[in-house]
Amino acid sequence: MFSEVIAYIIPPMRFRTIAVAGVAGILTLSACGAGSGSSSETVPADAALVVAAIEGINWDETEYATTGGSVKVAATNKSSLPHNLRLVDSTGAQLPNTFDIPSRGDVAVDTVTLAPGTYTLICTIAGHNNMRATLTVS
Ligand SMILES: [Cu+2]
């Protein structure tokens, strides 16, 4: 008798849990929509700027260059450590775009609005202060 009562109660509870998880998932997805790089496994052919994290806690270049405007940026991880890419403008302000590439082979893509000038590309993970490169936007 008791188990029948439990069996009657549990399925609706389980359904409610799934429904709540579903809503939370949708909220999480939409929260990621603004200024956050989308993840894929390949670097888009039309990316105007491709930045790769390599072994030794470094970017693959120390100097990058691109043309200003709406710039499709791709960050990729070619190393065994987690990394992320952030862009810092000449005033020291970090741009809102985020590129998280936690695992080897990860690719994060986002469109960044860049005015002509000099930017610094960084990785904000602790101990990765060495990952600094210059981006010149013409
Ligand atoms: Cu890093």
Image: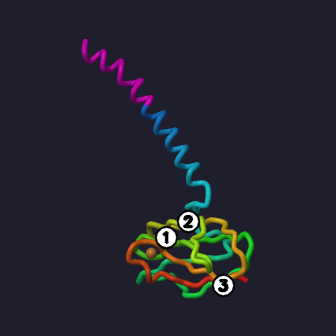
The quarter of the picture where residue 99 lies is bottom right
Are the residues flagged by discs 3 and 2 in contact, CB closer than 8 Å? no
Asked whether 89 or 132 is in front, the reply is: 89
Q: Mark 2, residues whose alpha carbon is within 10 Å: few (<14), some, or many (≥20)? A: many
The residue pinned by badge 1 equals 84
Residue 6 percent location from the top left of the image:
30, 20
Q: Residue at x 51, y 82 (%)?
A: 132
Are the residues flagged by discs 3 and 1 in contact, CB closer than 8 Å? no
Looking at the rendered structure, which numbered label has been put on residue 136? 3
Q: Mark 3, residues whose alpha carbon is within 10 Å: few (<14), some, or many (≥20)? A: some
Q: Residue at x 49, y 70 (%)?
A: 84
Looking at the rendered structure, which numbered label has been put on residue 98? 2
Residue 16 percent location from the top left of the image:
44, 29
User: From this viewpoint, which residue is outermost toward the bottom?
Assistant: 62
Helix, strand or loop: magenta stretch: helix
The quarter of the picture where residue 97 lies is bottom right
User: From this viewpoint, which residue is outermost toward the front?
Assistant: 91
Q: CA distance from mark 3 to mark 1?
A: 20 Å
The mark nearer the N terminus, 1 or 2, is 1
Q: Is residue 92 magenta?
A: no
Q: Amino acid at mark 2?
A: Thr
Is the residue at mark 1 in contact range of ligand 1, meaning its CB lies under 8 Å from it? yes
